[in-house]
Image: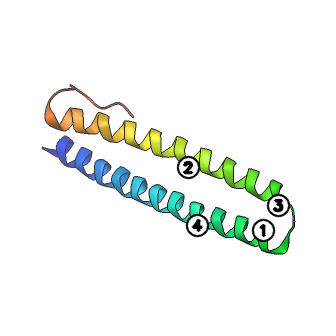
Amino acid sequence: MVDALKLATKYAGYASIESEILCGLSNLELTREALISTRDHMKTDSTEALEALSLVKRYLHQQRDIIRSEIQKIRGVLSGDLESYDD
């Protein structure tokens, strides 16, 4: 029972992190659109800023994938499909 509770708590934590990452990705897209709009309006080149946003987006996608993998492992253990969860 303690292991199931521990895993359920860990699952909730990972689900919360996933939600924050998805929110971050959404906000990042809004920031990117604002930057493009500003660039067009001011007729300047903000290529470096767009490249930096792309790097942040790639990092957030990687973190999202890691979190989703951990969530799947925990689901497997909680459902009985996997025997143990290794951090």
Task: Report, in whole angstroms, how far the alpha carbon at label 4 lies from the one at label 1.
Answer: 15 Å
Q: Residue 45, image x and y in percent? A: 86, 61
Q: CA distance from mark 3 to mark 4?
A: 16 Å
Asked whether, in this view, residue 56 is left or right of residue 1, the answer is right
Horizontal side of residue 81 vs 18, given as left or right: left
10 Å crowding of disc 2: few (<14), some (14-19), many (20+): some
Secondary structure under the numbered disc 3 in the rendered image: loop
Which badge, 4 or 2, is on the more N-terminal residue? Answer: 4
**x 79%, y 68%: residue:** 39
**Residue 4 image-quadrant placement:** top left
The residue tagged 1 is: 40
Q: Amino acid at mark 3?
A: Ser
Amino acid marked by disc 2 = Leu
According to the picture, the residue beneath numbered tag 2 turns out to be: 60
Return the x and y of residue 86 as percentages of the image width and height: 35, 30
Q: CA distance from mark 4 to mark 2?
A: 15 Å
**Neighbours of disc 3 within 10 Å: few (<14), some (14-19), many (20+):** few
At a point 45% along the width and 56% down the height, the residue shown is 22
Query: Closer to the N terminus: mark 1 or mark 3?
Result: 1
At label 1, which amino acid type do we have? Asp
Q: What secondary structure is marked by label 1?
A: helix
Q: Nearer the viewer, residue 46 or 13?
A: 46
Instruction: Tell me if mark 4 has few (under 14), some (14-19) or many (20+) residues whose alpha carbon lies within 10 angstroms of its own.
Output: few
| Percent position of residue 46, x then y | 82, 61
Give the residue type that dot 4 points to: Leu
Of labels 3 and 4, earlier in sequence is 4
4 or 2: mark nearer the eye: 4
Tell whether label 3 touches label 2 (CB within 8 Å): no
Q: Which residue is mark 3?
A: 46
Q: Which residue is mark 4?
A: 30
